[in-house]
Image (spheres, rainbow, N blue to C red):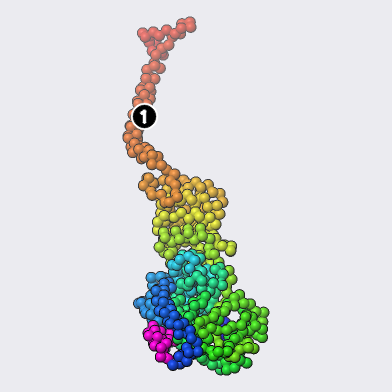
Amino acid sequence: MIISNPDGRYDTSVNYNHVNSERFGLLDTKRETLITGSKYLSRIQSRSNLVNQLERESKKVQGSLSEKDTRHALIVIASIDCGATTTTTDVNTITWTPDDTIISNGISRTVKPSYSLTSVLDTLRVFTSRKKNCYSIGVTQGTKILARATFNYGNYDGLLNPPTFDLIFDGNLWTTVKTSLSGSTTYEVIFVAKGDNVSVCLAQTMPDQFPFISSLAIRSLDSDVYSEVDDNRAIFLIDRLSYGSSKSLRYPDDIYDRIWVSYPAQSGTEQVTNDAIYIDATAPNNPPEGVFQNAITVPTTFQSIIIAHIPVLSPPTYLNLYFSEVTSLDFGQKRSFNIYENSSPVQLAITPPYMQVEERYIYNYVVTSDTNLSLSATSDSDLPPIINAIELFTISDILTDGTDSNDVKALALLQSTFDVLQEWRGDPCLPAPYSWDWLNCSNDVIPRVTALYLNSFNLVGSIPDISSMDALVIIDLHNNSLSGTIPSFLGTMSNLQQLNLADNKFSGSIPSSLSNNGKLKLTVTGNPSLCTSGKSCSSSLGSTNSSPGSTNSSSGSGTSTSKKKSSMLPLILGIVIPVFILLWIAFAAFIIFRRKKIPAEVNMQVISTGDRANINPDAPPVGSTA
């Protein structure tokens, strides 16, 4: 009767039909039994008020079934058939939808025919790229979530090598998935959603062992279910067993679609069937009535039922135990037993009620040595112990609050601006080894994004305002098709040390907050329309559209003045050049005239008389004789 399972796995390929599959057609039969069933009449005669009680309970059956019917559609958030191409409805009336509208990465594959289990588990999606790949499902913040992931390797790749990889939820490590060659492996976690989305991610941990998933179920639980668990922690299912049952049970019998795996009586134990016409299964965790139809016991009061083996160094454990008396005891009869830790009782004695249920739990249970939990009869009990069902969980550490909310909002803005980035989902930074491929994060408890590596991502358009990402040290956007002016907010990011905007289509001027930033390494080469040092702005600058948060160093009036000056230049040149030529011509004529006049002046005779010189025009030339 040991139910401990260190791997946390169970096979979901079994038929999950309810033990009492005709439950919705049994109401009239139950009423008839109230009147004519001789088996129960003898007990009614011994208890004069039992008939009235049964009639009241019969009416409660109608109300209970009606209430559960209205809630069936409320608890299913998502039923995802990974790798499928069409919608499928399984034997439990659950409709499974393909995942191709939820995730774009990965490859759809089908298991080999000899490994077929069910239509839902025969398809899968395998991920051969990226550090992690995530499914993201919208929920209401504060909702208590049950997430269940199932993996059927089925030798889909023909390599006979079932992979091992990590499973993550909302930035928290869930478990290391260990798949098998045949049969399916299932993991379940229950937690409270901290945001308006929950994510389930798969991360590769070993070379050439690619993560895959066959199905993903996301269910909503009532807030008072498993209320012992702190909202800041998760619980990981180890086992959920229905003792003495021949078939496993789930939705629609369990309104939360919990899977109660059948656990028939083993050597040393006996199966017993509950003879109650109706069982009021009201209990804190809303167990389904079906798990109380059967139970296991031992032959004598001197024997015990071992219900769990807790190994040393196990994480803190959470157990829920469910009991219901299987028969109406005779007057004076008593069934009473204790839960024992090895040889010591750990709780008050249990006396299961008939037609009702009792639930006991053990929370945050930690052992210092290998420990057996068992049920043993008390000294005054006439009957041996019984048990109908059990749930066994381990308890997580405190859950992360995720990456800094300002960074998350800014990244969401980037993703809404550039479609190619929308393929990345889940927490951007957590768990630490599995941040998004194009960013780096700090190691803080609430991590910050410190680097964006979006070079060669075919980004088109303007840069949105991501100034709230004030922990960024590196922004690399080179080799894209980004346009518009360079946003000025980039110069206000106090921790930014490297900004690479090369090989884009930016235009306008570089904001002074960037060009004058001495601690910033700025790269803007390969932007033909960008005004840089020593390069004038092009005439098209006036028509450039500024991106959000950007500034343009040239105003409209300045551009207009520049155009006017440019258009008057030919006229000015047309006037100045001819005038310049005419001046040169006049100057040349003056020089020629001057040279011709000098010889005539040399032939004149100059006569000095005293201190005056008289010019006699009749005198003979110099050197002649009178």
Residue at position x 55%, y 52% from top? 494
Q: Quadrant of residue 352?
A: bottom right
Q: Nearer the viewer, residue 250 or 521?
A: 250
Label 1 packing within 10 angstroms: few (<14), some (14-19), many (20+): few
Q: Nearer the viewer, residue 105 or 222?
A: 222
- The magenta-colored residue range is 14-37
Expressed as whole percent of the image width and height from the top left, the position of residue 101 reads 38, 70
**Residue 5 within the magenta-colored segment of the rendering:** no
Total labels: the figure holds: 1
Residue 178 versus residue 201 in the image, above or below? below
Expressed as whole percent of the image width and height from the top left, the position of residue 361 reads 57, 78
Asked if residue 530 lies left or right of residue 228, the reply is left
- Does residue 351 appear in this view? yes
Residue 86 versus residue 136 in the image, above or below? below
Callout 1: helix, strand or loop?
Answer: helix
Residue at position x 36%, y 40% from top? 560
Residue at position x 66%, y 86% from top? 343
Q: Nearer the viewer, residue 468 or 625?
A: 468
Question: Mark 1 — residue?
Answer: 584
Amino acid, disc 1: Trp
Q: Nearer the viewer, residue 503 or 51?
A: 51
